[in-house]
Amino acid sequence: MKNRFRLGCGVLVLAVLASLPSGGSAQLAGVRNGEWRHLGGDAGHTRYSPLNQINASTFAKLKVAWVWRGDNFGPGVEYTFRSTPSFVNGVLYTVAGQRRQVAAIDPATGETLWTFREPETMRYLRSPRSDFGKGVAYAEVDGRGVIFISSPAYFLWALDARTGKPLENWGAPVPALSKKFPATGYVDMIPDLVRDWDPWKNWKGAPYDPDHGIPQQLGMITTSAPPIVVNGVVVVLAGGEPTYDQTRIENVPSDIQGYDARTGKHLWKFHVIPRPGEPGHETWLNDAWKFSGSMHSWAPASADPQLGLVYIVTNSSTYQFYTGHRPGDNLFGGSILALDVKTGRRKWHFQIHRSDQWNYDTPTAPILMDLTVNGRRIPAVVQNTKQGLIFAFNRETGEPLWPIEERPVAQTEVPGNYTAKTQPYPTKPEPLDRIVLNGITEEFLMDHTPELKRRAQEVLSKFRVGGLYMPPLPWPNTSGVVNNVGCVGGLNIYHPPVADPTTGIMYASHQRGCSAPSYLVPSGGVDEMRGLPGKSAEAWRGRERHTPTTGTTVAAWKQGGPATGRLPLIDGLPVYKPLYQGLAAYDMNTGEKLWDLPVGTPPERIRNHPALKGVDVSYMGGTGHSIQMVMGDLLVQTTEDLRGEAEVDEKGMPLLHARDKRTGRILASVPLPMPGQYGMMTYLHQGKQYIVVQSGSARRSQPGSLVALTLGE
């Protein structure tokens, strides 16, 4: 027995040593000692871990260790799970449900250790996108572990990581909420947000009610991504009603705010819509800065603590599909921002697209890693986009790693509308999908058979075809073409990119889509979007989606017109070669694409289409979004079926793959009890490595869950 015990200890020590980071890996903090401290693993949001106990030779031995069900925590996670857990000091932390209930989980068993839920308020009930919580933030404050969350109601909470109780002597309690809320541990961030905002200063209505939040006529504020803690500062992002869910032009700006992690004291605020005298103010013509709002930061942030910078991407302003009331480039919309974490001052920025009217909000966090470009070591930041363009900068100075060109784009024909004259295009790396450059050219035209190609050419001859920035046409349409057609080839929030900081390789899944935008028609001042269901809590409670209309002034033009303007199918087939899901690898040291592979199996309607009999359609991939993580020498990957069909084995079970991270080749696979979604993470606990996959399936009636896998005996 004594010898067996010694042998077991030796094996355990070897396993632990093999699973720890190698000394040569250059990576921002967050995944040392088998932890996963940030939403994206490290502070640079690479979703990389050096753990390698689970490797190519052991991967096939993975077994399900436990399943944690999110539907036990209220509505909003019946079939979805959007939060990637953090693992710190032997505990997993996540949020679940529309209330974003915080939970601490035992990493070995999946047992819930504690939970915390914010008391209900009307501003929570009115909050849009309340179930989009993506995780928590963790920091050590005076030697104590603290969990920070920003809630759908726009409160900031600080919780003891060991007990889940709100921190004592932290924040600024609100007397009007004393019957619901604890005496400490939170901050109402709305007063800090609106204090210097002209519409609030000029508000003649009822005084501020902290239970209801911002008056509906002025706007709505919420959060989607969690805060990030950098050098003792809690940086809070903000969201609101999606700009495609409204036709009114006023809303509160989603300014970015910083708070002291020790006390909860408000430190600074960055105006996402520049005020007079601030850089970028000149890009808001017709005094649109006074009323225009939103500019949400939906995606998570990343940070470089050594540089003292936090990196944030922004969305568009209101109303999204027509910009005549807010002419100009509209800084800092559609931008990547590098802010000094101590002061909130802008160190540098780059506007990825101007005057957004295509729903091109940047959906994923900036990725930070050090690269060697032309023999020079550079601290870099890489930004992926919905469009499929990839931007890379020196994260300290904002200097592009490779030239970025200004290219003319199609101009609006809608009376009174505004379109930027040019948009930026990186010369390197090449886009995830080259179709975004010029649209459906001969290279991308459906040509499976000569007859299909002829019919596709006939259809396209009636449209004006272009790349990314094709504006909508007015209705009635007198342009001489049926409609404009544009193409995208990027990714979305459902399948974030990942990177390996030890090699400088980035991996991004992508999907091709070409369409004719809806026409714009005069609104006549009539708002036909969603309105308020009522004033009582009962009228709001239990709604699947909270999208209250904000503001008072309706945009002059809104989406409408006949459906005949859409790009038609040919016998159920698109006129372009579809790419339902691909997975590409880029060496970001050189900007070169290394490989690009289809992921999954094309849908049955394509495989068994009579016109495609005998045609190899495998290049199209499947419809399920690819989700991945880099782990040691592996690219761990699966697909989801939230908006497509997951890749399955012969028994219909979803698959988790181990791919060679240099070639993309599948080395081993194991079944999952339910499809993955959004993301995954890994950690080392008591000598054992685990992989946790965010899972769930509406198609299979499987609840939003966390599925943990580890090696069998």
Image (cartoon, helix red, strand yellow):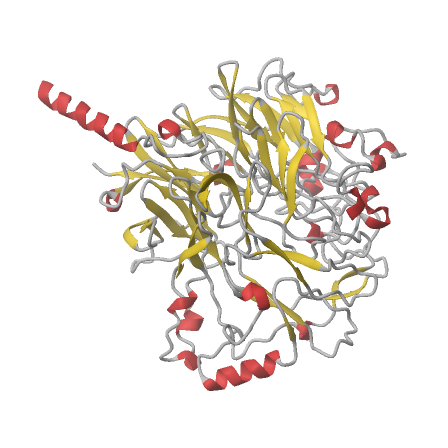
Tell me the quarter of the picture where residue 712 sits: top left
Give the camera-side residue of 347 and 177: 347
Q: Residue at x 14, y 21 (%)?
A: 6
Where residue 354 sits: x, y (%)?
A: 69, 53
Q: Quadrant of the N terminus?
A: top left
Observer able to see residue 703: no
Tell me the quarter of the picture where residue 527 sits: bottom right
Q: Quadrant of the C terminus?
A: top left
Where residue 404 sits: x, y (%)?
A: 60, 53
Q: Residue at x 77, y 74 (%)?
A: 477
Tell me the quarter of the picture where residue 470 sits: bottom right
> Is residue 571 left or right of 223 when viewed as pictured?
left
Give the camera-side residue of 308 and 711: 308
> Is residue 525 left or right of 274 when viewed as pictured?
right
Q: Is 245 drawn above or below residue 97 in the view shown?
A: below
Give the camera-side residue of 285 and 414: 285
Q: Is 180 drawn above or below residue 576 in the view shown?
A: above
Q: Residue at x 42, y 32 (%)?
A: 36
- Residue at the extreme front of the image, as rendered: 375
> Is residue 694 left or right of 148 when viewed as pictured?
left
> Is residue 534 left or right of 499 when viewed as pictured?
right
Where residue 697 sits: x, y (%)?
A: 45, 51
Where residue 186 sits: x, y (%)?
A: 64, 22
Q: Is 457 drawn above or below residue 210 in the view shown?
A: below
- How many numbered markers are drawn? 0
Observer able to see residue 363: yes
